[in-house]
Image (cartoon, grey):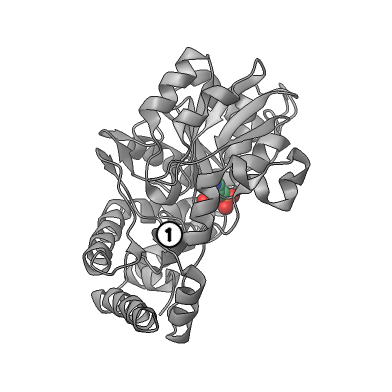
Amino acid sequence: MKFVDLHAQYLTIQEEIDAAIAVVIAESSFVRGRHVANFETAFAEHIGVPHCVSCANGTDALYIAMKSLGLEPGDEVLTTAHSWISTSETITQAGGTPVFCDTETDYFCLDPHQLESKITPRTRGIIPVHLYGQPADMEAILQIARQHNLWVIEDCAQAHLASYQDQSVGTMGDAATFSFYPGKNLGAMGDAGCLVTHRNDVAEFAALFAHHGGKHQHLMEGINSRLDGLQAAILNVKLKYLSDWTKSRRRIADSYDRQLSRIPGITIPPRRPGCEHVFHLYVIQTERRDCLRDHLRQREIPTAINYPCPLPLVPAYAYRNGQPADFPTAVHHAQRVLSLPLYPEMSPVDVERVATAIESFQQVTATAG
Ligand SMILES: *Cc1c(COP(=O)(O)O)cnc(C)c1O
């Protein structure tokens, strides 16, 4: 069994992918060009925003978004303690300082109640992450942002097509960023990313900044962060299937829920009411996480820990002197989370095998007392 089987997905659309790649090669349309433009238009439409600016990866998208919103040295940006480091490292790269907030007990996302006490005169924005595919509490976050005149960048790297009270993620903030890393819900065959926005000024700046500040008439210094033609052509094919793949993910999650909810000691992933969770990851919680992981490994069931250490406590942020007691919920989750295999092509037999193996672990430990 695989944790994510990218090849299984390729096999379902092999002819279309191979043909799309052949067209790009025949046209030598390797950088920018019509495939990139087509993808930007199609993805913006899919999300329901006027602008999509493609770039090299989801990390660059965050950096470009912050530069486009005018982040300046010394500015502070509030973000979650529980994410992949792209979310916070780009704040530093853009000249700012990441200020971490603890997470919600139920949903693993940034806890809006933590925001106000951390706002200072230098605070410029908030980056919530729709973690594992579950939307953050956007209503509360946007309300605080409005009160304090802060921008919001939604990190949607794990949440393509998720929705919050019938609004697609990526449409609610000043800008939103997506990753098309191969293992993400919409994945290229290499690195790729984009930002989307309803703000003309942000889209205009981002498009220039990602391409050296403009061609020849450089209006500013920028960077070189491009989506290439091959990846764009591949994404154009895959985008058509994203909605079906998302349904499959949700179906598999429902099936896991049914089989795991009756096992004592296992907490299934809670779902925020009024939201569509798109299950980039299916993350259970359990007290004896590391032993369960070994048990599954022995049965050739791969799992992952997303993430083993809250961001404010990793060595990169030692200089900020964060203490575990400052982030009790993130610390608690980091010790208990376990991501199970899940990808759209996963068979019901495999789902059942994972569930049965988890049940057998709980039985062994129950009898061992
Ligand atoms: C994957 C990911 C990113 C970065 O995307 P890349 O394309 O790998 O650079 C950013 N934020 C989160 C939450 C992610 O999961």
Task: Where is residue 245? Give x, y as percent.
Answer: 30, 58
The answer to whether residue 208 is seen in the rendering is: no
Q: Residue 344: image x %, image y %?
A: 32, 64
As drawn, 230 above or below 218: below
User: Is residue 134 shown above or below 140?
Assistant: below
The quarter of the picture where the N terminus appears is: bottom left
Residue 26 percent location from the top left of the image: 52, 59
Residue 98: percent from left, percent from top: 66, 34
**Mark 1 Cβ and ligand 1 under 8 Å apart:** no
Q: Residue furthest right?
A: 319
Q: Tag 1's secondary structure?
A: helix
Residue in the image at 33% along x and 32% along y: 48
Amino acid type, label 1: Ala
* 335 on left or right of 359: right
Q: Nearer the viewer, residue 366 or 203?
A: 366
Q: Is residue 355 above or below residue 280?
A: below
Name the residue at 28% across, 70% down. Answer: 263
Dot 1 crowding, Cα within 10 Å, few <14, some 14–19, many 20+: many
Occupied quadrant, residue 18 = bottom left
Count of numbered circles in the view: 1
Does residue 313 appear left or right of residue 270 in this picture?
right
The quarter of the displayed image where residue 65 is located: top right
Q: Is residue 73 left or right of residue 154?
A: right
- Asked whether residue 162 appears in the rendered view, the answer is yes
Q: Nearer the viewer, residue 15 or 162?
A: 162
Q: Quadrant of the C terminus?
A: bottom left
Residue that protrudes farthest toward the front in the picture: 369
Quick check: 236 above or below 79? below
- Residue occupied by mark 1: 20
